[in-house]
Image (tube, coloured by chain):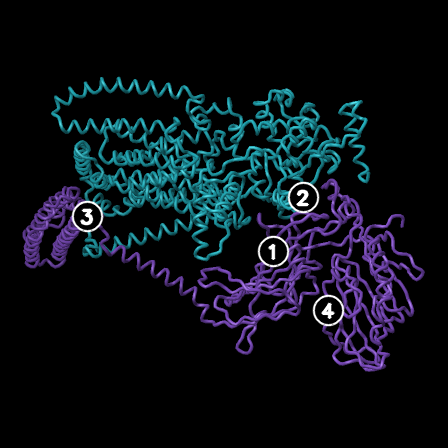
Amino acid sequence: MPEPQSSVASSGSVDRLRNAFGGVLCTFTLLLIGVLAFSIRLFSVIKYESVIHEFDPYFNYRVTQFLSKNGIYEFWNWFDDRTWYPLGRVIGGTVYPGLTLTAGTIWWLLNSLNIPLSVETVCVFTAPIFSVNASWATYLLTKETKGPGAGLMAATILAMVPSYISRSVAGSYDNEAVAIFALIFTFYLYVKTLNTGSLFYATLNALSYFYMVCSWGGYTFIINLIPMHVLLCIVTGRYSSRLYIAYAPLIVLGTLLAALVPVVGFNAVMTSEHFASFLVFIILHVVALVYYIKGLLTPRLFKVAMTFVITVGLAVCFAAAAILVALIASSPTKGWSGRSLSLLDPTYASKYIPIIASVSEHQPPTWPSYFMDINVLAFLVPAGIISCFLPLSDASSFLVLYLVTSVYFSGVMVRLMLVLAPAACILSGIALSEAFGVLTRSMKFQRPTLDDVSSTAGDGSSDTPTNSEMVSKEKPSKKNRKKDRDSEGSSPVDHRTEEKLLVLPCGPSAVGIMLLIILSGFYVVHCVWAAAEAYSAPSIVLTSRSHDGFHVFDDFREAYGWLRHNTDVDDKVASWWDYGYQTTAMANKTVIVDNNTWNNTHIATVGTAMASPEKAAWEIFNSLDVKYVLVIFGGLIGYPSDDINKFLWMVRIGGSVFPQIKEADYLKDGNYRVDTHGTSTMLNSLMYKLCYYRFVETDGKGFDRVRRYEIGKKHFKLTHFEEVFTTHHWMVRIYKLKPQKNRVRGKLKFKPSSKTSSMRKTGGKKSPWQ
Amino acid sequence: MATMPPPLRRAAALLLVVLAGVLASTARADLVISKADRRVDLTSHIVRVLASLKVENVGPDPVSQVLLAFPNIQAKNLAAIRAFGSEGKVKGQSTVLPIQVVQPSGAPPELTFFSALLPKPLEKGKTLYLDVLTVFTHSLQPFPEEITQAEAQLVVYQDSAHYLSPYPVKAQTLAIRLPGGRVESYTRHPNAKLVDSELKYGPFHDLPPFSYLPVIVHFENNNPFAVAKEVIREIEISHWGNVQITEHYNIAHGGARLKGEFSRIDYQSRPYVRGVSSFRHLIAKLPPRAHSIYYRDEIGNISTSHLWSDSMKTQLEIEPRFPLFGGWQTTFTVGYGLPLKDFVFYSDGKRFLNITFGSPLEEILIEKLIVKVVLPEGSKDIEVSAPFPTQKWQEVKYSHLDIVGRPVVVLEKPDVIPEHNLYFQVYYKFNNISLLREPLMLISGFFLLFVACIVYMRTDMSISKSSPSYLAKLQWDEVQATVQKIQGIFEQCLAVHDKLEASLRDLSRTGDIQSCKAARKAADAQFKELSKDLKPLLTTLHSSPQSYQIWPKVEDLIAKEREMQEKLMTRHSTVVDSFEKKLRGQDVENRIALQQQKIAALRQEVESLLEYISEI
């Protein structure tokens, strides 16, 4: 006989208390998730120090410093004359200001409360703070789709997903850190508007989209994904007034707001990335009109009207499309920016724009990088997709669409793995939550069922028909409901009753829970490892552990510090563009090219100089008013991402503009080598000489620890450059352009060949007292 | 010496001027220096001269001051001067004599005079032993001014072999201690001799006042010429138990400038030959129990430093990011915390900070030192007592939730050398209760935040009381209240069901059919009552436009519950009947098994429906 349950006496007040308790528990869990998201990103501060990481963050940091020192109006008008010499760069109009303004605001707020944090500290911790926000936004988005349980699960997963950690550890002060939050939050507000049909949320959505536009160029993903979803809804017959409210204000307000951002400006209506949204905007209105007319007219009349409208509409559409196509075709890139084109056509960049292809984060990812970045989520995502289809609502279809598109984009460009990560987290959260739900429920309701089964062993056969009957009864009712109204509110309970009957046996469900916990455990372990070991290195300080202890390689800052203090404030420093941002930020020197690769010709000039022989290079650099040349050299300690390994890109980019540089001259039988098999062009190039100048004297053989062979040309002298500084581990070498020799009177007649003059120069160098 | 470097020429010119001055001046007072031994220490870039004088009063009148003369060219580099005097036949207890700048009448303008005031006038025939320590900066001129990486740094020092004094000197010697290493040249003189690294001039006898014999030493000095262009030393007192010191340095190598290339390979392979003139580390002697020490610059932590500590001191060896060659410079910040009780004391109702003035770095010359003492917010009656004259002013600093700001005492002094590392005091009044201001502020801030949250949640913030959304919200609230009531009724129903079940169990245990029947009757009555209660609620719910979402559920619930009631009743009556008929337990079980299952299923459904409704 079944036993009475003890909690029968629960009344309304107890229930309310339970709700309140659930709310408190949920808030507390969210707080803990926040703590987790923040603290897992502090490994870099604990293991290294509180410092800005890598390349781009240094630029953002410099801009933030400028903003905090000079104020917002100066910032908008800032013309930076310390980069892209002699062109300069209008920072205010070419930078996505979201991150800078965010950190600047935080700094200003703290300082007005007399909490004296430095700009650097604020910048270092901006990314972890925003990853906390992002995990809360994930909670909201998932909750809006699948309830708070899935929300909490997804938030937890996102709090520690390695892909996002890689861009948001403390010190990684980059656009993506805030942009991912903005992305998720915009999606949340879109889904929220879709579910409620509230104009309030629609307005918020437009504002959130504006913040996203401010923060990252990836906003085009939003402005293409949401139209896609709207189109999907329309095509699948899910048009509703809520859909209209969710979309139309976003496009109108969002486009107006986006045009306010200087870097976007008229691009918001001029470039092809945005056209899809306008097209869908038109379609949506047509559909809305059709629905309206359908409500007014009788079915017969409606059919007549329909045929009429379609014929006229098609004609108009064709005309409009023709105009559009003509407009787009008239622009050289078909209205698409290079990065977007390389997204649509993965081979585009490598064919036409070597500078985009040269960046490692623009390469397609490898399979292991998927496992590294989203780990077990890759296996959970399919389950999440299935769960999204049970039942398919507007919100869950949006999530599926988001996932599918982001999987494609991440496959094209490794950097966009970052966009995939939230989708994977949300779907895995849903999958895990549903799985846990099913398994724990079957554990919970196990006992009465078991009793039934044992007591009525003979009636087991009569049991199943009733179940199937009930299921079959449910199905048509659901379908009916879907037809007349949206199934939003009513579906979960049917779903629940259905599930209640889908009870698994106790043993397997316990095992299943165990397995899921172990799987989650693996994920957590992997995430912590990734956060601690893989993604925490600031890349300006390197460490290594060998048998004789712990080594710190602080060469970059040594060099930048030297440049900062011991060269004139207006001296120009030439280096490959990778180090431009760092040089301006840390050494406070004017650079020729930097990581904002807006001028291909300028970069090609530097690449050409590096690939040219010494004299030609000197002339190029001298014409650019360069005083110091900086190269990164890893051959002494085995630092692989040095300039010799990047050299082929310099050749390629240089060769794409200046035809005298030919890649073939630097390759022997298709192989790139700097040993005795290297070509003479290679061994006489400035880059080779600057990197290996007097390198042979370190060990007598000139063994390069990165390339793992002895270098080709060991003993040579520099005629037009002199070494002024080399860091402790030789990672950064700085050379100064020698001034032109005074012309000795009378020599002019003979016009000596360059060889003799260089001989004379080296001869002159020996006695500096003359 | 084939060529005379410029400073030497200048010195020769000066000599002529000085001699002219000597002729013009009359003998000062009646003092005679019977013996003068001078020791010049040139081992670092700070020149220390210790002159031991034996002063006799041969005149009739007591003398209360002793004049000390320096050529202006030296006096402008003079960083510190101290005199210790002791009277008597033999050297005894010496006292520190106050020193002031004087301009005696008739003195040549090329000389600067200091006077050491004696505690009591020197009587006739008495002898005074006077030790004068003078410290000069910038007195070692690098020559040549530019050297390559491999060259050693040569410097020139010039002084007078004769003790320049307004008094006649009977016997005197001069000893110059050199750092060792090569001596390029020195002024030859019959009584000059160079032994090891000590250059001796003298003895000289019976020289008139203002005798001047220029000597020049040109020698190798590779000691770190660490010159700080500016040091800002901030001392922040927190009465929570910490004195935080932050020192910002801007350090340069003040020696011969490096010319030509800097080759790392040369420097690495033979650092003491190729790079001998550079220095790569500095040593700071911090007070004992210093903690939380950091060393960084504007681009981050500098990872090259070592720390030793014992009960007497904390020694910090810091290496700048790169070795400093002549003319190179760098900036960095050193910070550390000290325990409050070691440095702040309490006396006569006032607190005072007692801490050293200068920088803890050894053998460093600070061209401009700014000491800022940040007192806690709310300090009053601030006074400073420093052992030497400094520029003083006050500022206000805002930090950590300050409202009125913290008073800052700023002291500025040029040319600070290790000799200035003396204790100075800052007196102030501070009430301990002020300590609680900031925590209380935080607490009240959070309190207000929570209160604001509560107020926001509890009040009706809508602007228009007649807007459709507001009305809808009101209706929705009503619906919710109704739904809650309905829920309560259903809970009661379920409780009644349980009572029925319990009565059945009692029956099987006791066999009391009557009480079981009574229970059924009671349950029936209760059901009726509850359904009566339910009716008005349902009508209100049905009439409300907001309930369209819930209404089907509620209807469903009611139907399910009815069914369950019926089933329960039938089962109850069946069981009671079979008891009356005295059927076997097994048969009873069989008869009700099907019902049992249905009831269980229904109950689950009802419960899940209730749960769903409660979630809305």
Image spot of residue A447 (x, y percent) = 25, 48
Find the distance from the CA under tag 3 to the CA under tag 1: 62 Å
Question: Which residue appears farthest toward the right when viewing the image?
Answer: B190
Q: Disc 4 marks which residue?
A: B101
Q: Disc 3 marks which residue?
A: B470
Q: Residues within 10 Å of mark 2 (few under 14, many from 20)?
A: many
On whether disc 3 and disc 1 are found on a single subunit, the reply is yes
Q: Is residue A75 positioned above or below A281 on the image? A: below
Q: Colour of chain B?
A: purple
Find the distance from the CA under tag 4 to the CA under tag 1: 33 Å
Residue at left offset 13%, top offset 53%: B489
Find the distance from the CA under tag 2 to the CA under tag 1: 25 Å
Chain of the residue displaying label 2: A
Secondary element under disc 2, as helix, strand or loop, is: loop
Disc with the residue nearer the chain's start (4 vs 3): 4
Image spot of residue A374 (x, y percent) = 43, 38
On whether disc 2 and disc 1 are found on a single subunit, the reply is no
Disc with the residue nearer the chain's start (4 vs 1): 4
Q: Foreground residue, A25 or B78?
A: B78
Q: Foreground residue, B166 or B572?
A: B166
Secondary element under disc 4, as helix, strand or loop, is: strand
Q: Residues within 10 Å of mark 1 (few under 14, many from 20)?
A: many
Amino acid type of the residue that numbered disc 3 sits on in the rendered structure: Tyr
Q: Foreground residue, B432 or A770?
A: A770
- Picture quadrant of residue B247: bottom right
On whether disc 4 and disc 1 are found on a single subunit, the reply is yes
Disc with the residue nearer the chain's start (3 vs 1): 1
Find the distance from the CA under tag 2 to the CA under tag 3: 71 Å
Q: Disc 1 marks which residue?
A: B248
Q: Residues within 10 Å of mark 4 (few under 14, many from 20)?
A: few
On whether disc 4 and disc 2 are found on a single subunit, the reply is no
